[in-house]
Image: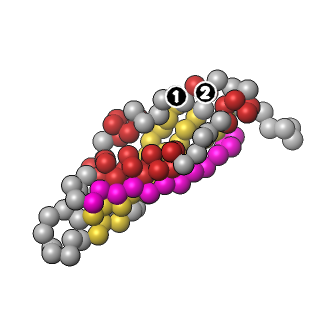
Amino acid sequence: MHRVLTEFGMGTSLRRGDYTQAARRALEDALWHNSINMAELFGFPKEAMHITVEIGVQRPDAVKTDELLSVFPYGQPKIVIREGGLDIPRPDGDGQPTIIANAAISVAFDMERADG
């Protein structure tokens, strides 16, 4: 497996305290800034892309990973949620914190190296 691309993104849930929403926005931020044409460049079908997603939030157990899979129209995504990101308390001390999630997306293909 050879990684050919890594992208980063950040997402927030400003008022709802929704870790899945913040994670989804981080994922979309990383994807929507780019047009990933790696499959075509290497002559592979898009389904051959191995996509590894790492998302950091303060409460990894609160992220619904299955909801994030729907973001990918093709490829073979694998999502790992780990502790990271930030929870920013509200100034008034009431309600949910502002949640910040960070995402890293790597795309790899199963191919031979050019240098042997």
Which secondary structure lies at badge 2?
helix
Q: Which residues are magenta?
A: 1-14
Residue positioned most to the left: 94
Relative to 1, residue 85 above or below: below
Residue positioned most to the right: 115
Q: Could you tell me what secondary structure mostly forms the magenta stretch?
A: strand
Which secondary structure lies at badge 1?
loop
Which tag, 1 or 2, sits closer to the chain's start?
Answer: 2
Question: Where is residue 81 shown, x and y percent of the image?
Answer: 40, 49
Q: In the figure, is residue 18 to the left or right of 27? A: left
Is residue 111 at all visible to an observer of this figure?
Answer: no
Q: Amino acid at mark 2?
A: Lys
- The residue tagged 2 is 46
Question: Where is residue 61 shown, x and y percent of the image?
Answer: 29, 50
Question: Where is residue 70 shown, x and y percent of the image?
Answer: 39, 33
Question: Is residue 33 shown in magenta?
Answer: no
The N terminus lies in quadrant: top right
Which sits in the foreground, 22 or 53?
22
Question: Where is residue 79 shown, x and y percent of the image?
Answer: 44, 42
Question: Is residue 5 shown in magenta?
Answer: yes
Please report the residue visible at 20 percent of the width from the left and 76 percent of the height from the top: 91
Coloured how?
Answer: secondary structure
